[in-house]
Amino acid sequence: MTGGSRGLGLLLADRLAARGCAVTLAARDGGELGRARAKLLHRRPGARVRTAVCDVRERAEVRELFADTGKAFGGVDLVIANAGIIQVAPLESLRAEDFEDAMRSMFHGALHTSLEALPHLRDSPGGGRLALISSVGGLLGVPHLLPYACAKSAIGTLAEGLRAETAGRGVSVTAVYPGLMRTGSHLRARFDGEQRAEYGWFSTLAGTPLVSMSAPRAAERIVRATVRRRARLVLTPAARAADLAHGIAPATTTRLSGVAARLLPAAPVHRRGQREGEDIDPPEGPVSRAVQRLGSALNERAADAYNERDGGTRGG
């Protein structure tokens, strides 16, 4: 499980452990991994859980991850590539390096994971299973999330292409396109531009029940789809509606995205540099602050449960 130290990755590991799977959590931060393992074992006493510090941007580290996991558990049967970053900002506040960072962390991370996993999965009794986590951002360009959307789009194409390439070879590949989920990821997302305003709209939407989805429910559906070898899974009604609309009327959908973009915060004159949501104050004004708190209340609770707070403590 790459990106397994927090958020959706930790929840996916929990659902796999509940099915009796031995689980390896992989991520870059050893401290996060230790806290994630403790949370998982507290919830699933007796589960077989190991951790591995691994930067999926580096293929050699991913190769070592699979070699060690195969030795520890006697093989590799199911892999979920979930590692990623979220950058929220208008185009004017982004650099080319931000796109490159997103591609390296998400697309190249998924690519390295896939290429190194496939030889192990082919040796799995009955055939192994691979799932790549894309996003609704991989289905259409989402304003103020452009680096994320570009990388997730590439992941979706990779997953669907791998599915075709591995057909009949004993390995299944599932492309997963989640919409917004209540994992507390707004605290670890990186914001630029008018940071307080960007953080305000993103954290509000990410925690609103009618727009976002319960993360445990999403994790269960993803694991179920992977186990059942489904080709494609789109999660949340909003994501399914966006997928359908873009497939039927892509030009109209793009025009509507342009309307939405004009409603989002404008870029400031000077670029400020990205900051994590945990380090940003709530929006200014009593009404905006009240709306943000109401919308993100469920997400704030999720952040504690799913290891999204830095060091496991509440941010300012």
Image (spheres, rainbow, N blue to C red):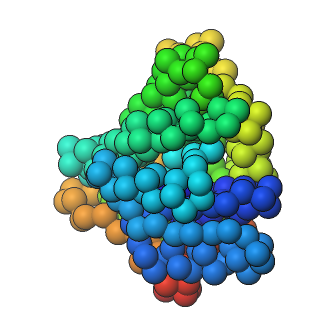
Instruction: Tell me what residue is drawn at x 61 percent, y 16 percent.
Output: 168
What is the x, y in percent for residue 42?
74, 80
Residue 279 drawn at (x, y percent): 42, 77
Report whether 236 appears left or right of 29. Answer: right
Residue depicted at 71% across the width and 52% down the height: 219
- Of residues 226 and 142, the one nearer the viewer is 226
**Frontmost residue, 266 versus 297:** 297
Q: Position of residue 301 (x, y in %)?
A: 70, 74
Using the rendered view, name the quadrant where residue 227 is placed.
top right
Task: Identify which residue, 257 or 217, lies in the foreground.
Answer: 217
Residue 239 vertical position relative to residue 221 in the rendered view, above or below = above
Please, which residue is most extreme toward the top here? 248
The percent coordinates of residue 283 (x first, y second) are 50, 71
Q: In the picture, which quadrant includes the N terminus? A: bottom right
Position of 264 relative to 14 (above/below) = above
Q: Is 276 positioned to the left or the right of 206 in the image?
A: left
Who's the residue at 31% across and 48% down the image? 59
Q: Is residue 234 above or below residue 67?
A: above
Quadrant assignment, res 248: top right
